[in-house]
Image (tube, rainbow, N blue to C red):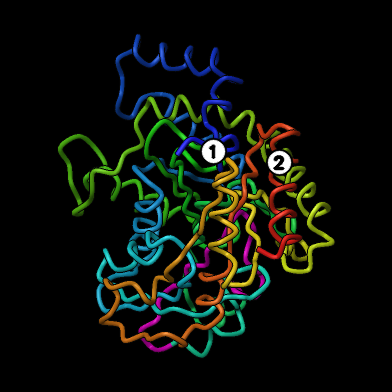
């Protein structure tokens, strides 16, 4: 379907930086160094600086970033890792792929992030780590999570896939735990021209371990001290991301302005709950997600679509109810807040290049839907 207002329009973004991106791509093509080129080294330094960490390692995807960070932190077979069910499956998948078991805790009904009050009930002698997800672009309450982790000697790998640039108490996402995992999937706030990811950390040992793991367990050519992976960030992706990184803060501010416009416009519609931004947080609005009655959510999405506006559900089936995790024994009702969010949340266009008339069309049609009692 062709939409007047897309959920995300990357062509618009590209149009604003085309000259610089094309120049960066040409440089890499001219140099013919497509794997582990200088742009990768430079991007790692720039991302570490941006996130406020000492180290960063470029990897092949955000999923790999979570997996390699956990593995480098010593998590492996038979271990348990606490995370949330209301997220993309990659979070739990990364845990499973190293032979560990994801243990799900429910989410906060206002932020949709991990509810720290539920964590300690799920800790056992097999628990080795916590993976909080900074969902939609807002950080979890990391003070409470880090206090629990310290008390029980657990590692914390932040899933920052949707939250690069988000701030909690003056610290950037990724700098608050043992390590942070970033995704550069094209639709992310800082997206490449394909897959890519990065691990950021202040822990030198964890950093060195990720460096080994992401490059076939190799510290020098043909010298392999451990079994690793082929999980490198391509030089072309790094070159594109270096261009985009310079614009990221400006784009994040535009997302916040768009979100505030929606918040003001929807303030008189009782049937919509707009995003909650908690104290000490700076939200980067990877998605602008509203909550509506579950009986009306899909009708609203269809109504918007019929009027040329793309809206989308993130995530219609919580991870604990996915077929691939049937063996964990979860059933409907076990994690009720996540299940309610899956039925009632809807993402509206919030990307930085939205025009004023496009935002107004979204507001007009959402308002019309509820005014008419559809």
Image x and y of residue 72, in percent: 35, 59
Secondary structure under tag 1 reads loop
* Label 2 Cα crowd, 10 Å radius (few <14 / some 14-19 / many 20+): some
Residue at 64% from the left image edge and 58% from the top image edge = 138
Q: Residue furthest top?
A: 30
Q: Quadrant of residue 110?
A: bottom right
Instruction: Point out residue 166 in the picture as x, y percentages from the top left corner.
Output: 65, 51
**Alpha carbon separation for disc pair 1 and 2:** 26 Å
Side of 327 relative to 202 (left or right): left
Give the extent of the magenta segment: 124-146
Question: Which callout, 1 or 2, points to the residue nearer the camera?
Answer: 2
The residue lying toward the viewer, choosing from 170 and 21, is 21
Label 1: which residue?
190
* Residue that mark 2 sits on: 361
Residue 2 in the magenta stretch? The answer is no
Q: Which class describes the residues within 10 Å of circle 1: few (<14), some (14-19), or many (20+)?
A: many
Do residues under tags 1 and 2 come within 8 Å of each other at their CB atoms?
no
Which is nearer the N-term, disc 1 or disc 2? 1
* Of 363 and 20, the residue lying toward us: 363
Q: Position of residue 241 (x, y in %)?
A: 50, 30
Q: Secondary structure at mark 2?
A: helix
Quadrant including the N terminus: top left
User: Quadrant of the rendered structure where residue 38 is?
Assistant: top left
Rendered-image quadrant of the C terminus: bottom right
Total residue callouts: 2
In terms of depth relative to the viewer, which is nearer, 328 or 347?
Answer: 347
User: Residue at 66% of width from left, 69% of height from top?
Assistant: 141
Q: In the rendered view, tell whether residue 26 sits above or below residue 320.
A: above
Q: Position of residue 135 (x, y in %)?
A: 57, 60
Tell me which residue sits at (56%, 61%) in the image.
299
């Amino acid at each position: 379907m062709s939409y007047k207002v897309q959920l995300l329009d990357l062509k618009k973004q590209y149009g604003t930086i085309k000259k610089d991106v094309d120049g960066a791509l040409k440089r890499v093509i001219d140099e013919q160094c497509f794997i582990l080129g200088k742009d990768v080294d430079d991007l790692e330094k720039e991302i570490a600086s941006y996130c406020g960490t000492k180290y960063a390692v470029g990897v092949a995807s955000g999923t790999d970033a979570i997996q390699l960070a956990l593995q480098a932190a010593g998590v492996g077979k038979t271990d348990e890792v606490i995370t949330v069910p209301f997220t993309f499956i990659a979070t739990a998948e990364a845990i499973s792929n190293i032979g560990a078991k994801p243990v799900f805790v429910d989410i906060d009904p206002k932020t949709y992030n991990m509810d720290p009050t539920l964590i300690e009930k799920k800790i056992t002698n097999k628990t080795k780590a916590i993976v909080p997800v900074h969902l939609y672009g807002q950080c979890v309450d990391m003070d409470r999570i880090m206090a629990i982790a310290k008390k029980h000697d657990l590692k914390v790998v932040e899933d920052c896939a949707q939250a690069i640039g988000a701030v909690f108490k003056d610290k950037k996402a990724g700098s608050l735990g043992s390590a942070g995992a970033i995704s550069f999937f094209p639709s992310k706030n800082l997206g490449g021209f394909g897959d890519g990811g990065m691990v950021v950390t202040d822990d030198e040992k964890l950093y060195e371990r990720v460096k080994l793991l992401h490059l076939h367990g190799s510290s020098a050519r043909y010298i392999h001290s451990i079994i690793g992976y082929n999980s490198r960030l391509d030089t072309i992706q790094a070159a594109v991301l270096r261009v985009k990184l310079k614009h990221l803060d400006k784009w994040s501010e535009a997302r916040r302005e768009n979100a505030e416009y929606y918040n003001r416009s929807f303030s008189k519609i009782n049937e919509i709950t707009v995003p909650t931004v908690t104290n000490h947080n700076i939200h980067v609005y990877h998605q602008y997600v509203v909550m509506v009655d579950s009986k009306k959510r899909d009708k609203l999405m269809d109504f918007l679509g019929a009027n040329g506006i793309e809206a989308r559900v993130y995530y219609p089936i919580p991870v604990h109810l996915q077929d691939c995790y049937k063996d964990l024994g979860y059933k409907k009702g076990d994690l009720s807040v996540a299940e309610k969010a899956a039925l009632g949340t809807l993402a509206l266009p919030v990307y930085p290049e939205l025009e004023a008339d496009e935002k107004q069309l979204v507001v007009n049609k959402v308002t019309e839907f509820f005014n008419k009692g559809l």
